[in-house]
Image (tube, rainbow, N blue to C red):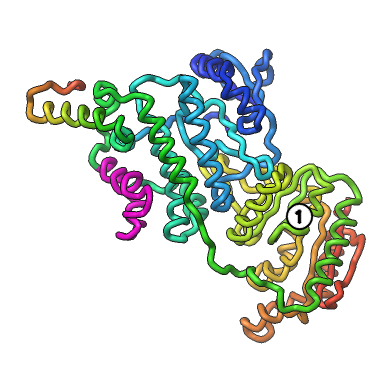
Amino acid sequence: MGGLLAYLDPGSGSMILQAIVGGVAAIAVAGKFYWRRFLGFIGIRKRDDS
Amino acid sequence: MRRALSERGLVDWEALAATDLFREGVAAGRLVATERVAEPDGLPAELDAANVAAVLRHERIPVVSYPYEWPFGMLQDAALLELDLLLAALDEGLVLKDASPYNVQWRGSKPVFVDVGSFERLREGEPWAGYRQFCTLALYPLLLQAYRNVPFQPWLRGSLEGIEPAQMRALMSFRDRFRRGVLTNVVLHAKLEGRYADREVKRDLKKAGFHADLIRANARKLRKLVERLRWEPEGTAWSGYGEANPYDEADAAAKEDFVRASAGLRGRRLLWDLGCNDGRYTRIAAAESDYAVAIDADAAVVDALYRALRAEGSETILPLIGDVTDPSPGLGWRGLERRPLADRGLPDLTLCLALVHHVSLSGNVPLRAFLDWLAKLGSEVVIEFPTREDPMVRRLLDRKAPGANPDYETELFERALEERWRLERRETLPSGTRILYRAIPRA
């Protein structure tokens, strides 16, 4: 089958889930991820993508 | 079978080709044998030669098949193979960039991963891009069948993307939410997907310290989850079928002799057994063929056959779910991405044992229309005709209005056969209500 472009959207929610369910190793990553989001939310920290 | 690579694809291929994973995977038959060929000659016109950095040649898989034709055990083993390859890839600094079970094909009962282009160099800090696809096309279908006893094949045939997280959540009962794997992979997954749709999170995850060990931990968990799933089919149409008939063993023995003699006449490249049931006759005929496809409409029967063949280590009989009256269609872009079975290789011998009465009386396909289709395959045929006096035929006819299926008569059937084939042999089985024919195409 030629001519079709294979690109897979990993899905944002699917990526975050992987940081949550990875057991002990995931706790720090998920915590940091959400802490950064929280700081961004209350305006202490600028969003990276802005 | 050849594959053109871009510059980037070539670098990824070279990274893969240098690994133990690749050498050992090919040697063990888990990865399709692949080599780089020097001459990119004869590339299809639609490929821009300027963008082709290299060409690979793959070993040919005898017959291509799709997850919606596989029973539970085959999708389960295909999913486990993908997870094993992902784990092995991570150890080599690689990752699988997708997780489609369509990347798995079969040599008989042995799964082979065919998409070497799925391996790419791991980018540190990035989650596994294939996780969502693993859920939608492998994990959810398996959970649906294991936990809800709902067959996944119609869903996968209806949607090439599989079951979306939100759909899967809606399919789970309250009790199911507490079954293994559901709370995280389904409920939380659907929730996060709804919440973070179209938001960029990759960079944030990287900054938060996401690393490959998390992919590894997740893949191990998924492996354990998938491995423990079981599907216990309830009694199906064929279970215990025929046991009431005292002639059955004598008929079966005569049928075995007939099939053995017919298949042994000459070597065959490809055998189809339509309505294979437990594969008793497939095995006999397959001994004289390079490769065989054993097809039955009953998923439980095919699952049992797959498990038996796997235990035997068979590499020459491919068990598939299929219904002559409702065959796999062409699907995807222009209906060409997934092909009808006949487009994937025609047989030179076809067995139709204990099939015709189901196609005609249950499927309501006129006998002549069925034979027209069969003749178009162009193969030799071993076909069984149960007469109107046969107990199974009577049972099927009893459910219908009197005078139904007037075309279902031995004489009419025989005449229709002779119009399309040359009859080489005819034998009435000991029961007296079943007739076997060997028919070869008129040149």
| Residue B278 found in image quarter | bottom right
| Residue assigned mark 1 | B282
Tell me which secondary structure the magenta stretch mostly adopts.
Answer: helix
**SS for dot 1:** helix
Q: Chain of mark 1?
A: B
Between B17 and B270, the one nearer to me in the picture: B17
Magenta region: B166-194
Q: Residue at x 84, y 59 (%)?
A: B259
Q: Magenta includes B191? A: yes
Q: Is residue B1 visible?
A: no
Residue B120 horizontal/vertical position (percent): 48, 22
Residue B289 horizontal/vertical position (percent): 81, 46
Furthest toward the front, the residue is: A24
Please tell me whether residue B170 is drawn above or below residue A42 in the rendered image: below
Residue B416 horizontal/vertical position (percent): 81, 67
What amino acid is found at the position of numbered circle 1 in the picture? Thr
Please tell me whether residue A16 is drawn above or below residue B190 in the rendered image: above
Q: Is residue B157 left or right of residue B440?
A: left
Please tell me whether residue B347 is drawn above or below residue B218 in the rendered image: below
Q: Is residue B437 left or right of residue B113?
A: right
Quarter of the figure that contains the N terminus of chain A: top right
Q: Magenta includes B190? A: yes
Q: Residue at x 61, y 24 (%)?
A: B3
Quarter of the figure that contains the C terminus of chain A: top left
Q: Residue at x 63, y 61 (%)?
A: B325
